[in-house]
């Protein structure tokens, strides 16, 4: 497991800047079929990383997930990745308002 904690410090800083509450924190939990069944929408933030894993662990769900392509710190600085995430989340919220 490559998670170094419950939340990136960059993400925590951006949440603070935006006034988004992100506490209480907990460590990441493994995804389950029950999680997928319960969800109205499942988003994998980095397709190239998550599609193969979903296909391996949950083959029936691989094509029922919305995939975004937001790079991790190995490929993009935090301000670029967080700006892209914000843009995608804003677009998602706007699309839900239109319905």
Image (spheres, helix red, strand yellow):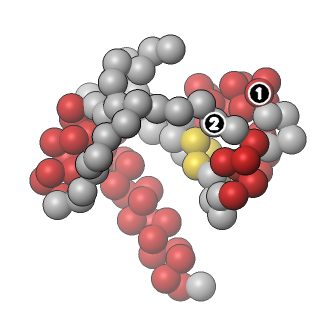
- Position above or below: 41 against 54: below
User: Residue 71: which quarter of the image?
Assistant: top left
Q: Which residue is mark 2?
A: 31
In the image, residue 63 lies at what x, y percent?
A: 79, 45
Mark 1 highlights which residue?
57
Extreme residue in the left direction: 17
Frontmost residue, 84 versus 37? 37
Residue in view at x 58 percent, y 42 percent: 44
Q: Height in image: 17 above or below 6?
A: below
Give coordinates of residue 10: x percent, y percent. 21, 35
x, y percent for residue 12: 21, 41
Asked whether disc 1 touches disc 2, contact meaning CB atoms under 8 Å apart, the reply is yes
Q: Residue at x 73, y 47 (%)?
A: 34
- Earlier residue among tags 1 and 2: 2
Q: Secondary structure at mark 2?
A: loop
Place of residue 81 in the rendered image (x, y in percent of width and height, measured from the top left)? 33, 38
Front-lying residue, 21 or 55: 21
């Amino acid at each position: 497991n490559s998670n170094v904690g419950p939340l990136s410090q960059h993400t925590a800083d951006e949440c603070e800047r935006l006034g988004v509450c992100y506490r209480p924190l907990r460590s990441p939990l493994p995804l389950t079929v029950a999680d997928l069944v319960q969800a109205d929408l499942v988003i994998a933030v980095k397709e190239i990383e998550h599609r193969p894993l979903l296909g391996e662990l949950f083959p029936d769900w691989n094509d029922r997930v919305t995939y975004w392509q937001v790079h991790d710190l190995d490929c993009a600085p935090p301000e670029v990745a967080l700006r892209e995430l914000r843009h995608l989340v804003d677009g998602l919220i706007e699309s839900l308002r239109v319905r």
